[in-house]
Amino acid sequence: MIHKPTKRPLIISGPCSAETPDQLLKTTLELKATGKVDILRAGIWKPRTRPNSFEGVGEIGLKWLIDAGLETGLPVITEVANAKHVEAALKAGFTKLWIGARTTVNPFTVQEIADALRGTGIEILVKNPINPDLNLWIGAIERLKNAGLEHVDAIHRGFSSVESKTYRNAPMWEIPLALKQEFPGIVLICDPSHITGKRDLLQQVAQKAMDLIYDGLMLEAHIDPANAWSDAEQQVTPKNLAVLLNSLILRSEHSENVELNSELALLRQKIDLIDEEITALFAKRMGVIEHVGRYKRDHHITILQPNRWREIQKKQLENGQKNGLSAKFIVKYLEALHQESIRHQTAIMNK
Ligand code: PEP
Ligand code: MN
């Protein structure tokens, strides 16, 4: 059901952690009543960054989750972090599991889980590793596929980053999109709860995921979010989950409307032409740069001129601001431009 979803977005919801049978069942009944949830999630083993935080109820919770699923008819999913967890979950009757971000980083553990799952036909979702390393994510998926699992899909939950202030985990959307390019058939689920860390920001991240054609969403919901034993700030009540989901605008990738499509094609032609101009301008800049390079070489001047570089940055940041371009974009693009310029000049120096 995850691997070939019949509905978009596929919604996986439930509490961060199963706390008590009562908390889990009440949350599940309310989630079921929204009519919007496809799969029930709950963490039983919680790999927490610091000790002495709530680390999950453990094996006993497996049965609570299975029972809540039976009571409501919702399929269930939980997180496994080692082979022992896999064994216990399989024994309890789970057919869907996910691997958490703190596990995906460790190839030995992922391999151990893959070996424990060999021949089971289980559906498995792999969260991105906590660090922004696409290959680690790809590697984890490959290990599971190599163990003969056919239903291996992915959850994007953001990346630990010193830079991120707005979000608990920076989304770095380009990474999951690159994963999708690597595995075109993969089902990609977005987890706005762990990306944002704050319920106020869930909607905008969920909407962005829909606009980037994600297949589904994993959103944490709790009967009493403020008093949740883990991730209290990012959970929502089942009712608010329904409000959030109702607010999402689902745009389709293509329009049926021929006129609209030709208008879009025209705009795209314009974009292509502008991109060509930009590339030609870059090439023109490199021509001048090479000229400067020859001058520097002949007069024994260094390639790198920090003051000149700072001056360029300052000018273009101001210019960018005037033209509605973000400082982040200008800094990034100038950086790339600078590197390419240095590369051209180095080639000249070494001639
Ligand atoms: C979770 O889903 O509750 C969880 C622990 O997530 P992550 O592995 O993304 O931190
Ligand atoms: Mn959580």
Image (cartoon, rainbow, N blue to C red):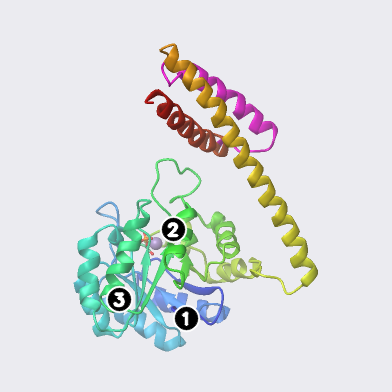
Pick the quarter of the image with the N terminus.
bottom left
Q: In the rendered structure, which amino acid carries the disc numbered 3?
A: Gly
Tell me which residue sits at (61%, 28%) in the image.
316
Crowding at mark 1 (Cα within 10 Å: few <14, some 14-19, many 20+):
few
Crowding at mark 3 (Cα within 10 Å: few <14, some 14-19, many 20+):
many
Q: Is mark 1 within 8 Å of ligand 1?
A: no
Could you tell me which secondary element the residue under label 3 belongs to?
A: helix
Q: Is mark 2 within 8 Å of ligand 1?
A: yes
* Pointer 1 or 3: first along the chain: 1
Residue 230 image point, x, y percent: 37, 60
Identify residue for label 3. Answer: 61
Q: In the rendered structure, which amino acid carries the disc numbered 2?
A: His
Identify residue for label 1. Answer: 4
Q: In the rendered structure, which amino acid carries the disc numbered 1?
A: Lys
Vertical comparison of 48 with 69: above or below: above
Identify residue for label 2. Answer: 194
Tell me which residue sits at (24%, 53%) in the image.
51
Identify which residue, 180 or 34, lies in the foreground.
180
Residue 39: which quarter of the image? Answer: bottom left
- Give the magenta part as a residue range: 302-327
Identify which residue, 313 or 162, lies in the foreground.
313
The secondary structure that dominates the magenta segment is helix
Q: Is mark 3 within 8 Å of ligand 1?
A: no
Q: How far apart are marks 3 and 2 (CA)?
A: 22 Å
